[in-house]
Amino acid sequence: METIIIIVFLAGYLAITLEHNLKIDKLIPALAMMAILWAIIALAHMPVFEVNAELRELEPTHIDEILLHHLGKTAEILVFLLGAMTIVEIIDYFDGFATIKGYIRTKSKRKLLWLFSILAFILSAIIDNLTATIVLVTILQKVIKDRNTRLWFAGMIIIAANAGGAWSPIGDVTTTMLWIANKVSASQLIIHVLIPSIICMIVPTLLAGTKKEFSGQIEGSFEENGPKSKFGATMLYLGLGAIVFVPFFKTITHLPPYVGMMLSLAVVATFAEIYSSSKFSISNVDDGSHAAAGHHSPVHHSLSKIELPSILFFLGILLAVAALESLGYLFNYAGSLNEAIPNTDIVVMLFGVGSAIIDNVPLVAASMGMFSEPIDNPLWHFIAYSAGTGGSMLIIGSAAGVVAMGMEKIDFFWYLRKIAWLAMVGFVAGAIAFILMRDFVIHV
């Protein structure tokens, strides 16, 4: 039966990895894999266990209890992401991100490279690397007309956005997973991973700045189109501030992060409704007339725009990995891996390389079931760094890369030839910085 479980998981994993080749959305194999794995466990009456992190052992439990436990943990992540996505869409409803374009005044390609890299690094830490990439590539398309030049900029935005997301508990799905699972705290994650992430961004940007593609000036003139709404700038700063507030809320109240995110969403939604011309209740969609009017509500509009396929994908993959964890496979695999490769730094860096080839979400989900180190152990910080930045080495290795690939029609092999080596140098440089800081500077 163990063989069947592994085959189902690997087949589902392969289908997720080959999403673009099979032309099947990755949420489909993720959901199917999850349902089939738990069905096999139930029908075969396989024993399930809960990992006791303190005792580092497996404790027998009932399938209903362990499934409810994993569903609760997964729901915390999904509700958190739903809130964050809705706030970002509300900002976009008021065209708040157009405010960022106002900061772009130079025509020097090298200065623009640094400007976009720094913006990607900072924005991704607040609104996540996927959204930051969408925003900046959209701005890029309005600022730079030459497509070849734009491709280079898009590649560097991917590297900077992934680096920026790695050090923030709200900057990447994987760091959010580690944060919500109490593997890392916001303050310690920033202390340990911020400098390596900065190095991971700066080194490739410095190297790229020496290339001829970033020399000279861009052609054409900037379009002086301000935000469509006079409330754009206000909603941008309010929305970003509301998202940044969440880690502070968790620290003060010790409540799960999704509670703080719901409070932030309520505040942002209130101002959105006030600023909107619509005057009806957010929750009133009982009949057709309300549904029609609902289109003009910034909240309804934003809820209709969020990436529900991504939410369902996370549900499937996290509960599928939870099935392997409940059977004790991940716990036992971690022991075998530690025996084969005693140096955990090498193991974690291999995770980073692996996240470029396959999705980093299941990799991090698996690592949480494999290792039982306490909160803020350097291992978790290194996993956050590696999984977050390693995906930049291939364009399909991160959500930021995939969305940029779609927006600019970037060729896989072009990115492999031109950008991948820059991402790899940055990844290794940041990893070395992390290890040196951990061993010689920060003592935990």
Image (cartoon, grey):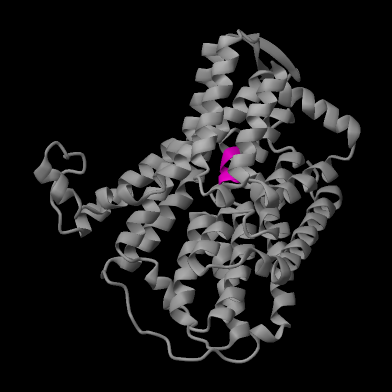
Rendering coords of residue 357 (x, y %): 69, 50
**Relative height, residue 48 to residue 138 (above, below):** above
Whether residue 153 is visible to the viewer of this picture, yes or no, is yes
Read off the magenta span: 173-177
Rendering coords of residue 306 (x, y %): 38, 49
Which residue is at 21% across, 52% downward? 297
Instruction: Report the side of 280 relative to 409 (left or right).
Output: left
Whether residue 185 is visible to the viewer of this picture, yes or no, is no
Which image quarter: residue 163?
bottom right
Q: Quadrant of the C terminus?
A: top right
Residue lying farthest to the front in this orientation: 22
Magenta highlight: main SS: helix
**Total numbered badges shown on the rendered structure:** 0
Rendering coords of residue 54 (x, y %): 72, 21
Task: From the viewer's side, name the closer residue of 444 and 121.
Answer: 121
Which residue is at 58% across, 74% downward? 151
